[in-house]
Amino acid sequence: MSGTTRRSALALLGAGLLARPVWAEGRTIVDSAGRKVSLPDRVSRVFVAGPPASVLMYALAPDMMVGWIRLPTAAEKEFLTGPARDLPETGRLTGRGDTVGLERLIAAKPDLVLDFGSVTGTYVSLANRVQDQTGIPYVLIDGTFAATPASLRLAADIIGRSARGAELAAYAERTFARVDDVLARVPADKRPRVYLARGPEGLETGGRGSINTEIIERVGGVNVAEGLGGRGNTANASLEQIIAWQPDAIVTLDRAFFAGVKTKPGWDQVRAVAENKVYLAPGLPWGWIDAPPSINRLIGLRWLLKTFYPTETAIDLRTDTRFFYALFYGVKLEDSQLDRLLGGASAR
């Protein structure tokens, strides 16, 4: 999420104080931005501010969710558990698209607004102003990949589900440790140079250090798009640039690009395409690389580890996927569902 994604939400806040409910203060917590936030003793209804927060809350406490920022599609619902999959659409306070009016936020009667992502000044300002004008506590949780275990524990403590947070955080720590173990055995010059292809043409990507590519970099992949659009930003690349970069592997989130890359003029000049090293990341109910950049990336980290270092890791991807979906999403995968999730994830 960029610093510009909340401008329309901020615009909603300039009209003055709204009529608002009064919440009893029961305890004070410190969120990831260092803000002291007073909460009721018991949190039972949580309004998620944006897409990453919706994934986090679904994994931690789907029964507390007021609703989804957008209704899940039929394909996504297959990999979600009821009754959470049938919650209403509430809209979002952050991210692209329409925002939630503060009157609508108050009408939802949440005990808490939770955001998961950047905790820079822009986001602090929004949180403070929404909280001041609605009276609803608003907490910011650090969404950077490295902070995942600590953020899971903090968010879980805030909503009163500490044991659940500890369980999921332990999984994240084991996953990061597994990555570090493999990377310790792979010399830097043996790690792949990777291009992230977004969109049906494959020309949208993330510069090195962006939230979109940090999962690739965390698994030791060298992002070839260094400096494109400035560090940490997404930007469009040209096919000429991609040919010049000559990545060893291409990771894509777009099924149309994956299906047609070999027929696209000029792409045959990219070594990764010629050598069948284009990989489609699974994407249900959420993407394994980003879309959104939340805790759904943990299974993506294991997938990339297996994809980039097949001889250095003993990961059984089908077993790992079953375990992750059961633990995080509450879904027991059938063989046919696994086939569909992983069937397109092989090289092309």
Image: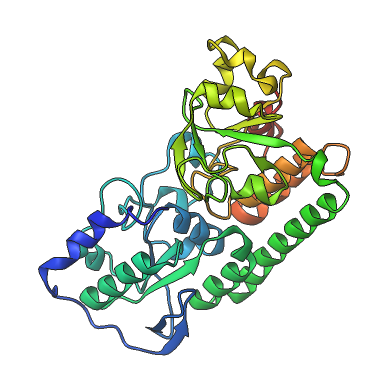
State the count of labels.
0
Residue 295 versus residue 134 in the image, above or below = above
Residue 103 visible, this angle: no
Q: Position of residue 17 (x, y in %)?
A: 14, 75
Q: Nearer the viewer, residue 196 or 283?
A: 196
Foreground residue among 326 and 238: 238
Q: Please report the residue visible at 21 percent of the width from the left and 75 percent of the height from the top.
A: 133
User: In the figure, 348 relative to 74: above or below?
Assistant: above
Outermost residue, left side: 15
Q: Residue drawn at (72%, 50%), measured in percent from left and top? A: 323
Q: Position of residue 201 (x, y in %)?
A: 47, 22
What x and y, as percent, mark residue 181?
Answer: 84, 55
Residue 115 placement: quadrant:
bottom left
Residue at 56% x, 37% y: name it.
283
Instruction: Residue 348: name its quadrant.
Output: top right
Residue 314 placed where, x, y %?
87, 44
Residue 85 or 178: which is nearer the viewer? 178
The correct choice, above or below, for 98 with respect to 28 in the image is above
Q: Is residue 119 left or right of residue 136?
A: right
